[in-house]
Image (cartoon, rainbow, N blue to C red):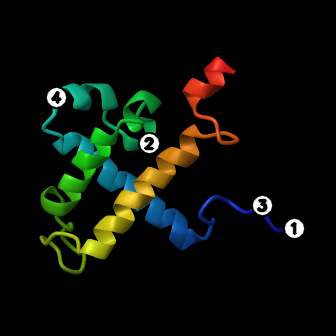
Amino acid sequence: MASPMQPGGASDGWLQQKANQLVIGDQCLAWLPDKEIKKLAGEKWALMPESVANQPQIYQWLATFLASGYKIPAGRRNAGKNLDEDTAMGVWGGLIRQAHHRFSQGGMTEASRARA
């Protein structure tokens, strides 16, 4: 029997891509120059509280990190270089989508569920 459809798919390649996005998100949190947001966000992108993940500023910092702070790791093609624009946009959008899927249930965020 086939498994149910997952948000964004469930192929091995897609799951690896999402895992890679989270690694880059963790690196962004370690890099963050804003000490207040860094403290609130924690060390793991996947565990970032909704109160931080809902703030546009975290994604502004992520965009800055992807454009100028992140370097492709050794052992990979283009090691030591920045991501190209399409890849950086894919990581940025992927981390936004992961946060959306993590915090939304039936179109409701944690805050709106508490009010319901």
In this rendering, which labeled residue sits more in front, label 3 or label 4?
A: 4
From the top left corner, tell me how far across and down residue 110 is, in percent.
57, 28
Residue hosting label 2: 46
Name the quadrant of the N terminus. bottom right
Q: Residue at x 12, y 38 (%)?
A: 33
What mark, if any, has residue 35 been given in the picture?
4
Is residue 89 toward the left or the right of residue 109 in the image?
Answer: left
What distance separates the C-alpha of mark 2 from that of mark 3?
23 Å
Q: Residue at x 31, y 47 (%)?
A: 59
In this rendering, which labeled residue sits more in front, label 4 or label 2?
A: 4
Q: Secondary structure at mark 2?
A: helix
Type of amino acid at the residue the image marks with label 2: Ala
What mark, if any, has residue 1 been given in the picture?
1
Type of amino acid at the residue the image marks with label 3: Pro
Residue hosting label 3: 4
Type of amino acid at the residue the image marks with label 4: Lys
What distance separates the C-alpha of mark 3 from that of mark 4?
41 Å
